[in-house]
């Protein structure tokens, strides 16, 4: 277990990338023995729907949807080193950049963290996808902090322009008590 001590005396617990799963319609993706995701599409292939089920439930719960993409869609599961909490990234690749939705799962409950419009900051890249292995997720008390180990292009939700942030500068901070997502650009 890696623990980092900050100036405030709190230790940061790291979420480690556990696994990545290619989404296949009608197949379940289980990140552990009880937390599973299911995917389906509408008959016109306009929308891709994600459902969540916990072993203690009998029904699948609709969690989210995205525009259907002919490219790939994946689930990336990050597990906390201290307990049975997870951060799950649902990445869907489109022609120009991927869309990433983040979720927090603990004690059989799932909460949407938010949407991340991120990509690599280069025009000559073969793919503009941001490498998932270069996303760092830490928990400091009630805050889950998502940062990026390489430079990243990021488009804030209420902004029309993409902005370049150097490695480690952009931080997405999700409070697990209030379910509020904030961004720190310093």
Image: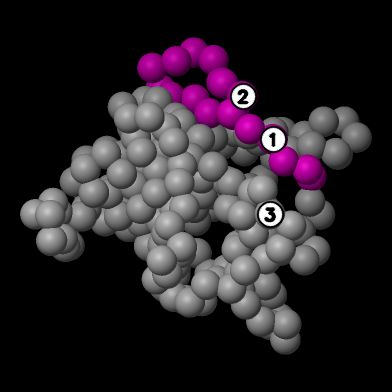
Identified at 62% across, 77% down, the residue is: 121
Of 147 and 56, nearer the camera is 147
Mark drawn on residue 156: none
- At label 1, counting other C-alpha atoms closer than 10 Å, the crowd grade (few under 14, some 14-19, many 20 or more) is some
Which quadrant would the C terminus be assigned to in this image?
Answer: bottom left
Relative side of 59 to 173, left or right: right
Vertical position of residue 53 compared to residue 58: above or below: below
User: Which residue was labeled with disc 1?
Assistant: 65
Direction from residue 4 to residue 142 in the image, left or right: right
In the image: residue 48, left or right of residue 20: right
Residue corresponding to mark 2? 62
Are discs 1 and 3 less than 8 Å apart at CB? no
Q: Of all residues shown, which one is farthest toward the right?
A: 44
User: Disc 1 and disc 2: Cα gap in Å?
Assistant: 8 Å
- Find out whether residue 64 is within the magenta segment: yes
Residue 33 shows in this picture: no
Magenta stretch, residue numbers: 51-68
Residue 108 picture quarter? top left
Residue 179 x %, y % = 42, 32
Image coords of residue 24 (percent x, y): 67, 45
Of residue 42 and residue 121, the one placed in the foreground of this image is: 121
Asked if residue 50 lies left or right of residue 179, the reply is: right
**Label pair 1/2, CB-CB below 8 angstroms:** yes
Closer to us: 122 or 79: 122
Find disc 3 in the rendering and name its residue: 159
């Amino acid at each position: 277990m890696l623990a980092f001590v900050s100036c405030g005396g709190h230790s940061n617990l790291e979420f480690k990338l556990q696994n990545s799963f290619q989404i296949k319609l009608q197949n379940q993706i289980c990140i552990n023995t009880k937390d599973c995701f299911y995917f389906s599409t509408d008959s016109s292939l306009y929308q891709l729907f994600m459902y969540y089920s916990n072993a203690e439930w009998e029904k699948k719960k609709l969690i989210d949807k995205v525009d259907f993409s002919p490219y790939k869609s994946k689930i990336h599961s990050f597990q906390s080193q201290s307990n049975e909490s997870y951060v799950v990234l649902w990445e869907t690749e489109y022609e120009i950049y991927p869309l990433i939705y983040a979720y927090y799962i603990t004690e059989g409950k799932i909460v949407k963290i938010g949407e991340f419009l991120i990509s690599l900051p280069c025009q000559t890249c073969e793919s503009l996808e941001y490498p998932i292995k270069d996303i760092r997720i830490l928990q400091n008390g009630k805050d889950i902090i998502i940062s990026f180990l390489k430079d990243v292009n990021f488009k804030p939700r209420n902004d029309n322009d993409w902005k370049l942030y150097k490695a480690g500068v952009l931080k997405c901070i999700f409070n697990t008590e209030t379910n509020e997502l904030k961004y720190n650009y310093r």
